[in-house]
Amino acid sequence: MFETEMTNVFQQLTRSSHGVSKLAMGILLVLFGVGFFGIGFDQGQLFSLVEGSKAYGDMYLHEFSHDMRHASGLPCH
C-alpha cells in the first residue's frame, strides 16, 4: 500500500505542462518591442507621453543608451 501511494506522488510531481501560453508570449513580445524601441530608436517619444514636448529636448533614454546604440550599430543622430 505504501509503494502505491509513493508511486502516485512521484507521478504527480513529474507531470508538467509543456509549452508557453499565448498570453505570456504576447506580453513578452510587447515588452521586447517597447524595450527595443526605447534603447534603439527613441528620441524622446516615450517620455513625451508624460512630459510633453520638453522630453524631445531632454531625451533621457537616448542619452542613457547612447553608447550602447553606437556599439550595436543602430542609427543615433
Image (tube, rainbow, N blue to C red):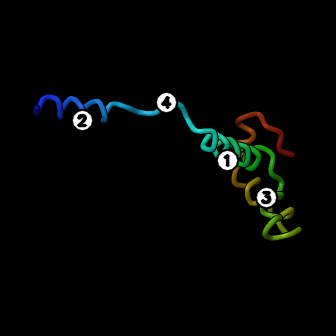
Spatial CA span between label 1 and label 3: 13 Å
Image x and y of residue 63, in percent: 74, 55
Label 3 residue SS:
helix
Label 1 residue SS:
helix
Q: Residues within 10 Å of mark 3 (few under 14, many from 20)?
A: some
Q: Nearer the viewer, mark 3 or mark 2?
A: 2
Residue topped by disc 1 = 31
Q: Looking at the image, is mark 3 or mark 4 earlier in the sequence? A: 4
- Residue furthest to the front: 1
Q: Amino acid at mark 2?
A: Val
Q: Nearer the viewer, residue 42 or 29?
A: 29
Image x and y of residue 9, in percent: 24, 35
Residue topped by disc 4 = 18
Image: 68 above or below 56: above
Label 2 residue SS:
helix
**Residue at point 10%, 33% (across, down):** 2
**Residue at point 75%, 39% (across, down):** 70
Q: Looking at the image, is mark 4 or mark 1 earlier in the sequence? A: 4
Spatial CA span between label 3 and label 4: 36 Å
Q: Nearer the viewer, mark 4 or mark 1?
A: 4
Residue topped by disc 2 = 9
Q: Looking at the image, is mark 3 or mark 2 earlier in the sequence? A: 2
Total labels drawn: 4
Please state, as top left, top right, bottom left or bottom right, where the N terminus lies in the image. top left
Q: Looking at the image, is mark 1 or mark 3 earlier in the sequence? A: 1
Q: Are marks 2 and 4 in contact (CB under 8 Å)?
A: no
Spatial CA span between label 4 and label 1: 23 Å
Q: Nearer the viewer, mark 2 or mark 1?
A: 2
- Checking the image for residue 52, the label placed there is none
Q: Nearer the viewer, mark 1 or mark 3?
A: 1
